[in-house]
Image (cartoon, rainbow, N blue to C red):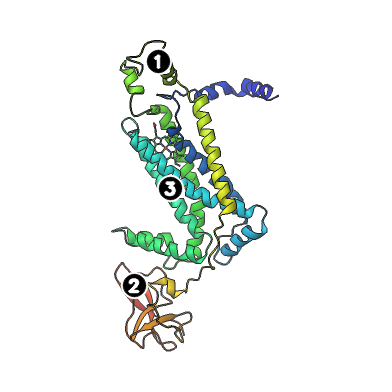
Amino acid sequence: MASKLYTWLDSRLKLKSVERTLLDEPIPGGASWIYVFGSATLFLFLLQAVTGMFLAIYYAPTPDHAYDSIQFIETQIMFGAFVRGLHHWGASGMVVVIGLHMLQVFLYGAYKSPRELMWMVGVVLFLIVLSFAFTGYLLPWDQNAYWATQVGINMVGTVPVVGDLLAPVLRGGEMLGALTLSRFFAVHVLFLPALLATLVMIHLFILRRVGPAGPWRGGYERRKSGETASQGREPGSPGFVERRVRRSETFYPRQVFMDAVVMLGIFAVVAVLALTVHFPLADKANPSDAVLAVAGPEPGAPSVRTPGCVGHRRSISSGRVRAAGDFAPGSLCRASRGPGRGEGSGGVCAVRLHRLSSHSCRRRRCGA
Ligand code: HEM
């Protein structure tokens, strides 16, 4: 039945030539378990794409609903927690596997001429994978997500020259809020997948043009100059035959088999982690939580609410206001000094600080 369908399709779409192109690619030096990491990264990307699509059905990218929608997925949707777990552990797996892929390419010298372009495209792919992790982390909108993203954007803000420009672009303004969440969501589910898919195609297109590098000793280049790995062996000896066979090996069947085994193994590990290791949400993001906004109160210092400045909190230690609340989250300014500030309704509220540049703060009046 399947072969009849294939013949029918082949007579119309000429599938045989596509099949040959995809599967008959020669692998210099033969198939190897060490070449599986590129395909494994590709597999994890596909897993992320599929699980992400299902999560997106229920996820709502607004500060009011993001946290609740994740809880809804976790508790009310059939397999919701499992799919979220796959996405969570798949993301970590992708960072690990892409790291191993880079390591293999580096150790085998596969980045050298004529494969420099593959390496360069690969570096961009790596940055995209990290951007996936960064933008995805904010989406649950819990305290961890909110404040970790705050720190991340602050770090971007400290980059020389462009930092002050980039941080507000990432944040969508001065404050981390609804605009930040919606742009992180759009980047996470639209921009980055499109970019990654395009670059992976370019990556693989270049691979097809230049061919795989092969093993770091022996292999294609040496064979082209007339040297063979079987030199010094008697024709007919096991080593002689084995090596000659492996040298002209195509991608199918052995490399396909190895890739498939590793993909299955990775899926099994990610699935077991998703089923057994729970990663609970923290509390819902609270942008006015001053304790997390700066260094936090000194040990033992009382934490009080400042009258007149809603949501303001300060910790007082030896007459010094050390850290206080309702300043623009993201501020690197650590302290406003002097007792008396931050008090009184409608007065100057020294605790509302805005980051103007890496080093300067200004005071703001805050509402009564
Ligand atoms: C989404 C990310 C990526 C995917 C899906 C991907 C996929 C692949 C695949 C399927 C291969 C062929 C099989 C193999 O050699 O493993 C490959 C080869 C290669 N990749 Fe990647 N890759 C990614 C990221 C990277 C990164 C971050 C780098 C380096 C910075 C890189 C550099 C290379 C190079 C130089 C080769 C050629 C290896 C050789 O000829 O032996 N790739 N990639």
Quadrant of picture, ligand 1: top left
Query: Looking at the image, is 277 positioned above or below residue 353?
Result: above
Q: Position of residue 62 (x, y in %)?
A: 55, 63
- Describe the element under mark 1 as helix, strand or loop: helix
N-terminal label among 1 and 2? 1
Residue at (33%, 22%) from the top-left corner?
221
Query: Looking at the image, is 284 positioned above or below residue 319?
Result: above
N-terminal label among 2 and 3? 3
Question: Which residue position holds label 2?
Answer: 333
Circles 3, 1 touching at the beta carbon (< 8 Å): no
Question: Residue 123: which quarter of the image?
Answer: top left
Q: Which mark is residue 3?
A: none
Q: Position of residue 195 (x, y in %)?
A: 46, 44
The residue carrying pointer 3 sits among few (fewer than 14), some (14 to 19) or many (20 or more) residues within 10 Å by Cα, namely: some
Side (left or right) of 298 relative to 64: left
Q: Name the amino acid, label 3.
A: Ile
| Gap in angstroms between the C-alphas marked 2 and 3 | 31 Å
- Describe the element under mark 3 as helix, strand or loop: helix
N-terminal label among 3 and 1? 3
Q: Which mark is residue 240?
A: 1
Circles 1, 2 touching at the beta carbon (< 8 Å): no
Q: Name the amino acid, label 2.
A: Cys
Residue at (36%, 11%) from the top-left corner?
234
- Describe the element under mark 2 as helix, strand or loop: loop
